[in-house]
Image (tube, rainbow, N blue to C red):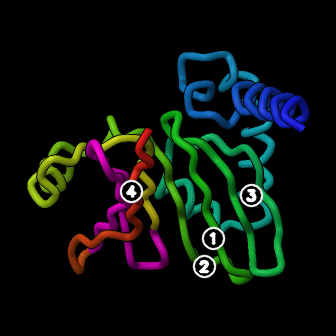
Amino acid sequence: MKKIFFQRLIIAGTALMLNTLAPAQTSHTTPFVIADAGNHSVLIADLKAKDTKIFNHFTKAWPEAILHSVSNEKDGKHINATTRGNILRTRYDNKGRFQSAVLSYPCSDLSEKIADQLEQYFPGFTVFGTVIDVTVREKKALLVTMENRTTWKRVRITDDGIDVYEEYVKSKQ
């Protein structure tokens, strides 16, 4: 049983490291962007020809984005892309209206102002991991992970303020 689990763990780890959507591999300094450029050109041309409204909104909102996939779903069109090496997922309804976007980026890219606010609001905690920037229509929220020696929290930042979205106590070893 342990051997099977270990094999699955190795396979999953290898797959994650070789995934071309990983931020470290899709930065503008690696050859993966060049390999995706042809696919991006085809996808962007197709999007422009078929869905001008979506094309105009998407290229205005994320001019540096590199498209990886555009899929038609029951609830509308889903676009997966990277922008400045960060993963972006957007969704538009069947009429081409923007519905939502989720942008994931490393905590090192979080603005100093927000990082300072969080460290004042939660003394003794430091920001770590990935920041998730969620936009749903006109509303925005940031999900930031913070930790201290004993706990970690996922903090939600909105126009309404800051609150704890998730909180876990670390196991003692």
Badge 4: residue crowd in 10 Å (few <14, some 14–19, many ≥20): few
Please tell me whether the stretch drawn in magenta is mainly helix, strand or loop: strand
Q: Position of 89 compared to 132: left or right?
A: right
Across and down, in percent, residue 49 comes to: 78, 59
Residue positioned 71% across, 48% down in the render: 44
Could you tell me which secondary element the residue under label 3 belongs to?
helix
User: Nearer the observer, disc 1 or disc 4?
Assistant: 4
Marks 2 and 1, the one that precedes in the sequence: 1
Which residue in the protein does label 3 denote?
47
Question: In terms of depth relative to the viewer, which is nearer, 52 or 105?
Answer: 105
Q: Which residues are magenta?
A: 135-158
Badge 2: residue crowd in 10 Å (few <14, some 14–19, many ≥20): some
Real-space Cα distance between discs 1 and 4?
Answer: 46 Å
Which residue in the protein does label 1 denote?
53
Real-space Cα distance between discs 2 and 1?
Answer: 8 Å
- Residue type pointed to by label 3: Leu
Real-space Cα distance between discs 4 and 3?
Answer: 46 Å
Could you tell me which secondary element the residue under label 4 belongs to?
strand
Across and down, in percent, residue 135 comes to: 45, 69
Q: Quadrant of residue 139?
A: bottom left
The reply to whether discs 2 and 1 touch (Cβ–Cβ < 8 Å) is yes
Residue positioned 35% across, 58% down in the render: 153
Against 162, residue 114 (above or below) is above
Q: Position of 44 compared to 127: left or right?
A: right
Which residue in the protein does label 2 denote?
97
Badge 1: residue crowd in 10 Å (few <14, some 14–19, many ≥20): some
Marks 2 and 3, the one that precedes in the sequence: 3
Which residue in the protein does label 4 denote?
169
The reply to whether discs 3 and 1 touch (Cβ–Cβ < 8 Å) is no
**Magenta span contains residue 166:** no
